[in-house]
Amino acid sequence: MSATAGLVLAAAMMLSTTASAETIALPRTKVPLVLPDGWTRLEAAGVVAAARGPKHTLVAVTRAQVPNADAWMGPKTRAAYATQVERGILRTLAPSSTKLGEANGVPALDVEARRPDGTLVLVRVLMFRTYALAVALEVPRDADAAEARAIAAAFTPPKA
């Protein structure tokens, strides 16, 4: 599951569909992607949803059909599992911060990291029992990350 690869793919295949605020219903999940005004939807193979913001920030949602039983066991098992997921995300990035928590009862891993060129990468991985859903955002070095952080924070399942 490479959310960062999805972002690159989305940028390469920029096909605009809208430029207004919207809530995007994602297939086979109740988690929506909420984008503010000014974002343009993109289409890309292998990505559930993608868009570009007015400051050239990119967002991509990926889904992996993987069992996440260890994320649901106990605190130690969950932390060890999240560490493995984090290592996969950070293979080519320098970590800034990592937080393991829950989003409305679903284990969630939030990672912020930087590329060598200064690009900020934000990733939220929701670890459902039978699949993982990830939102990844790339924020250019000179752009404000507040909007991207808000998009990642809003990427949560509805309350049960």
Image (cartoon, helix red, strand yellow):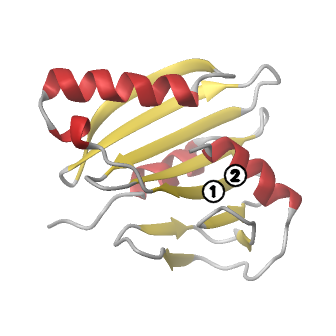
Give the answer, above or below, for where 30 lies relative to 119.
below
Q: Quadrant of residue 96?
A: top right
Q: Amino acid at mark 1?
A: Ala
Residue 101, horizontal then vertical, whole percent = 26, 36
The kind of secondary structure element at disc 1 is: strand
As rendered, which of 70 and 55 lies closer to the eye? Answer: 70
Categorize mark 1 by other alpha carbons within 10 Å: few (<14), some (14-19), many (20+): many
Number of numbered discs overlaid on the protein picture:
2
The residue that label 2 is drawn on is 6
Left or right, 51 with reference to 66? right
Give the number of the disc on residue 60. Answer: 1
Q: Nearer the viewer, mark 1 or mark 2?
A: 2
Residue 148, horizontal then vertical, whole percent = 58, 49
Task: Locate the C terminus by quadrant.
Answer: bottom left
Q: Amino acid at mark 2?
A: Gly
Residue 143, horizontal then vertical, whole percent = 74, 41
Q: Which residue is drawn at the image coordinates 75% and 66% (left, top)?
A: 44
Q: Which residue is drawn at the image coordinates 67% and 64% (left, top)?
A: 50
Left or right, 128 with reference to 50? left
Task: Locate the N terminus by quadrant.
Answer: top right
